[in-house]
Image: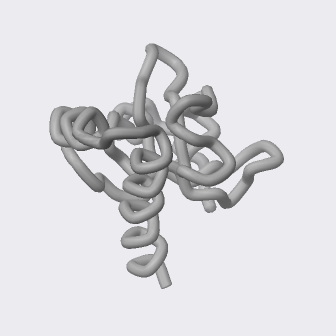
């Protein structure tokens, strides 16, 4: 997987997007972007990185896979879940769709 070297490619990583890590011990792992700062995003996969403990990762160490859901819809869906476990299950279901489409 090639790293997004162009700033335009990095800008498309937004909340609700599925991304894949290209560097670090989690290389190749699929994540959902649940928050964003200027140079970093907050990632969750629902298993190793639950919603309560998202991973902060530099944008240049990620590659965009697909836009899963709009940011406003993601926030509304996560707030509709009654507990943290259900939020993690919801994220796993979203990422499972992306993983199946990649094969």
Q: In the depicted view, which residue is nearer to us: 3 or 38?
A: 38
Q: How is the image coloured?
A: one colour
Q: Position of residue 11 (x, y in %)?
A: 36, 32
Residue at the extreme front of the image, as rendered:
82
* Location of residue 97 with respect to 90 vertically, above or below: below
Q: Quadrant of residue 56?
A: top right
Q: In the depicted view, which residue is nearer to us: 10 or 43?
A: 43
* Location of residue 52 with respect to 90 vertically, above or below: above
Q: Position of residue 22 (x, y in %)?
A: 67, 50
The residue at 30%/42% (across/down) is 81
Residue at the extreme right of the image, as rendered:
25
The residue at 67%/60% (across/down) is 28
Quadrant location of the N terminus in the rendered image? bottom right
Tag count in the figure?
0
Residue at the extreme bottom of the image, as rendered:
103
The residue at 57%/41% (across/down) is 50
The answer to whether residue 103 is left or right of residue 68 is right
Q: Position of residue 42 (x, y in %)?
A: 52, 29
* Location of residue 82 with respect to 26 vertically, above or below: above
Q: Quadrant of residue 60?
A: top right
The answer to whether residue 64 is left or right of residue 17 is right
Q: Position of residue 58 (x, y in %)?
A: 61, 28
């Amino acid at each position: 997987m090639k790293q997004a070297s162009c700033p335009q490619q990095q800008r498309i990583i937004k909340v609700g997007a599925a991304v894949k890590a290209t560097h670090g011990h989690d290389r190749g792992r699929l994540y959902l972007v649940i928050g964003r700062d200027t140079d970093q995003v907050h990632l969750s996969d629902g298993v190793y990185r639950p919603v309560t403990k998202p991973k902060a990762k530099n944008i240049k160490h990620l590659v965009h896979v697909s836009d899963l859901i709009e940011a406003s819809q993601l926030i509304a869906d996560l707030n509709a879940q009654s507990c943290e476990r259900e939020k993690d299950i919801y994220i796993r279901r979203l990422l499972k769709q992306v993983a199946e489409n990649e094969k």
